[in-house]
Amino acid sequence: MRSVFTIIICVLLQTPTLNSDIYCDSENETCTRDISGEKFIFYDVNPPEGFNLRRDVYMRFAIMLAEAKRNGRKRNWHLVLPPWHNLYHWKNDKSDPIPWSSFFDTVLLKSYTSVVELHEVFSNIQELKIDRLYVLQNYPNAFENGDFTEKWKVADTCNNYERSFWGYKNISVKEEICINFQGKISQLWDVIALHPADKHVMFSHGEIPLHDTYGTKTYWDCRRSMVFNKQLIEKSEQYISKYLNCHTKLCSNYLSVHWRRQDFAQYRKNKVPSIAGTARQIDKAIKNFNSYIYKVYVATDAPFSVLRQLETELTYYGYTVFYYLPSDDDIETFKDGGLAIIDQIICSHAAYFIGTHESTFTYRIQEEREILGFYSTTTFNRFCPDKGQCEKPSKWTIVH
Ligand code: GFB
């Protein structure tokens, strides 16, 4: 009788907030816990990882939260968007942490699941003490006994982890726990359950947990909510309209390429083409696809002198080459991250696209084109090395 009474009280206590994932257990005395408290997941990513892998890591966390909420759980949990700070590839943006709104439409991100910018967390508090920082680390041998199994455990030894907290000096941690982790991200809920009263939980090395499911409708629902912000879209559309003379979303009059160089050209020489080989492949693709196309948009991280060499080669074939040359104002306004996004948007709208094998920058363009509705044959194309094998690109088509 006493336990039925306790359950009723607990239900009454919880109903008005509609905001708790705490299930009152009649057998223990936890019913008095604060059920109105909001809870936050923070995460960060291995410092050398670039912008476009980080976008995927975000999706893993966002989907983990959205799926739990879809099942009626974790209603008072929010995901904190880690500011963009000190990214290895962004040579000009090393100073202040950049909020997600500088790149994305955060209203749409929030419509997918409950996400907040870090500065929003600070709108209520001066100082943040994270209850538990879980430092995720790989198992020394992922394929123990020949199998990759899902597992995690509190680790006996901790790898070196340098806390930076995106440059914020008013963030600290009460306790740090190292976790060997392998497999799906939803296992993190079990890690969180180690300390159910925690309100601020952080995971470092957020890139280690994997998607529960990749390329499914769930994946694409989240992906579709990652829309670039209005200014970046407008800037890109102005360029497409003014220079490429296309005034619709699905352009028919230019080909685009993502020509990843830098570390790819240096360390993956046998996977990327030479400059002359690149021009040859572009020419071949245009002749096969639509020989009336004569405009080629090049997005690249190559030094300008190398880009000019590609331009010379393509001009020799009779093509007009376009690339986005930011003004000083553009650099100031959009920063390295925004300028790269402008390149991605312009590539997304082209009649035909060729990307760089195993570049996440290319993958995100391919996803954008799937969302726009291009035929997949115009999207999943890659540059091949001049000689040797050229694996087919993986093809992740949209699921509605
Ligand atoms: O996004 P990202 O990590 O993709 O590329 P990958 C690295 C960064 O290089 C981008 C710049 O975020 C941009 O800042 N970048 C690359 C570009 N391509 C372009 C481009 O066409 N235009 C402009 N404006 N900028 C990963 C790396 O790169 O590849 C890892 O992050 C590692 O560190 C791995 O090197 C092999 O997947 O291409």
Image (tube, rainbow, N blue to C red):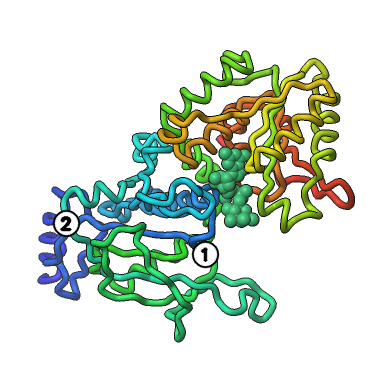
Q: Is mark 1 within 8 Å of ligand 1?
A: no
Residue 135 location (% of width, % of height):
42, 71
> Does residue 372 appear in this view?
yes
Q: Classify 248 as above or below 65.
A: above
- The residue at the point 34 percent across, 70 percent down is 133
Q: CA distance from mark 1 to mark 2?
A: 31 Å
- The residue at the point 24 percent across, 51 percent down is 121
Q: Quadrant of residue 354?
A: top right
- Look at the numbered disc 2 and give the secondary structure of its residue: loop
- The residue at the point 67 percent across, 81 percent down is 145
In the image, 31 versus 332, the foreground residue is 332
| Precedes in sequence: disc 1 or disc 2 | 2
Q: Nearer the viewer, mark 1 or mark 2?
A: 2
> Does residue 361 appear in this view?
no
Mark number displayed over residue 332: none
In the image, 332 versus 152, the foreground residue is 332
| Residue, far bottom | 156
Residue 167 location (% of width, % of height):
34, 58
Q: Quadrant of residue 198?
A: bottom left
- Look at the numbered disc 1 and give the secondary structure of its residue: loop
At label 2, counting other C-alpha atoms closer than 10 Å, the crowd grade (few under 14, some 14-19, many 20 or more) is: few
Q: Is residue 396 left or right of residue 217?
A: right
Q: Which residue is mark 1?
A: 208
Q: Classify 198 as above or below 224.
A: below
Residue 99 location (% of width, % of height):
35, 44
Q: Which residue is mark 2?
A: 126
Callout 1, which amino acid?
A: Ile
